[in-house]
Amino acid sequence: MAETLFPVRQRCKKCGKALGRDLATVLFGLYCSPSCAGMAEPSKDAGDSRTPRECKTMREGKWEFKRRYRSVQEIPDLIREDPSTNWYTCGHCGAIHVGHSRLGEAEQFRMVHVQSDIADVLVKRRGLATIAQVAKVAGVRPIRLKELENGVAHPDGMATLLKVAPVLGLSLGFGIRQRRGDGRDVPTRRAGSSVSVSRTRALRP
């Protein structure tokens, strides 16, 4: 039988205290605190390598925590009605996060400057497919793809990326600076490798 969740549930399943009053934290729709939920305190630093990818997102080159919703009803209708949007309960913080399974039209081409940029593209292109599903089609070990998405370096990382990219409809390339007659680089925007997103839809489960 399905559990009754917040906001219908008004009391913590463990201690019986009021649940979600005055915008208080609600975990898994059932509990008022990590201790009641039987879990450790969530990380307070999004940039910590121990903070899982499911709980954070990259914004302007910096890791930030994803917005935390206490119930599906708290997610704005505009977001819930977007077919490219999905939501899930985070095992790290107990809140509901929103994920986007597509890149916008303005992001059909993206420059990559740091490893976390690659992770962001991979997660969005994977969409609703699981890591295991993508890894199976690409012929790689799931742990290698998980490492790429979490920004963890591994000797096989590049080989894994080259196999996974076509499965996700991605093409890899390099932005090459032009050189002047004196051999110096022509001033350009920040240099970096690039990821081109094809019109192929991301793999779905």
Image (cartoon, rainbow, N blue to C red):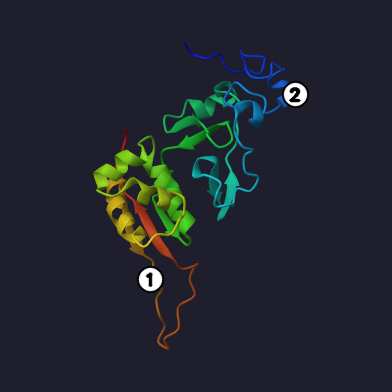
Q: Is residue 151 above or below residue 18?
A: below
What residue is at 42 percent from the left and 43 percent from the top? 124
Farthest residue to the bottom: give it. 182
Q: Taking the image as drawn, is residue 201 in sight?
A: no
Classify 10 Å Cα crowding around label 2: few (below 14), some (14-19), many (20 and above).
Answer: few
Query: Label 1, on which residue?
Result: 176
Name, please, the residue furthest toward the top: 1
In the rendered structure, find residue 26 and report the number of the disc placed on it: none
Residue type, mark 1 in image: Ile
* Residue in the image at 46% along x and 37% along y: 100
- Is residue 124 among the parts visible in the rendering? yes
Question: Where is residue 94 shown, x and y percent of the image?
Answer: 57, 31
| Residue that badge 2 annotates | 22
Which is more toward the observer, 77 or 28?
A: 28
Figure check: 124 above or below 90: below
Task: Please name whichever residue, 11 or 57, is drawn nearer the observer in this view of the structure.
Answer: 11
Tell me which numbered mark, 2 or 1, is placed earlier along the sequence: 2
Judging from the image, what secondary structure is the residue with disc 2 in?
helix
Q: Residue at x 37, y 48 (%)?
A: 143
Q: Amino acid at mark 2?
A: Asp
**Crowdedness of circle 1 by 10 Å Cα count: few (<14), some, many (20+)?**
few
Q: Residue furthest right?
A: 22
Question: In the rendered view, would you say 71 is above or below 67?
Answer: above
Which residue is located at x 46 percent, y 50 percent?
Answer: 150
- Position of 168 with respect to 91 (left or right) is left
Task: Tell me the quarter of the image containing the C terminus.
Answer: top left
**Label 1: which secondary element:** loop
Tell me where residue 26 sits by quadrant: top right
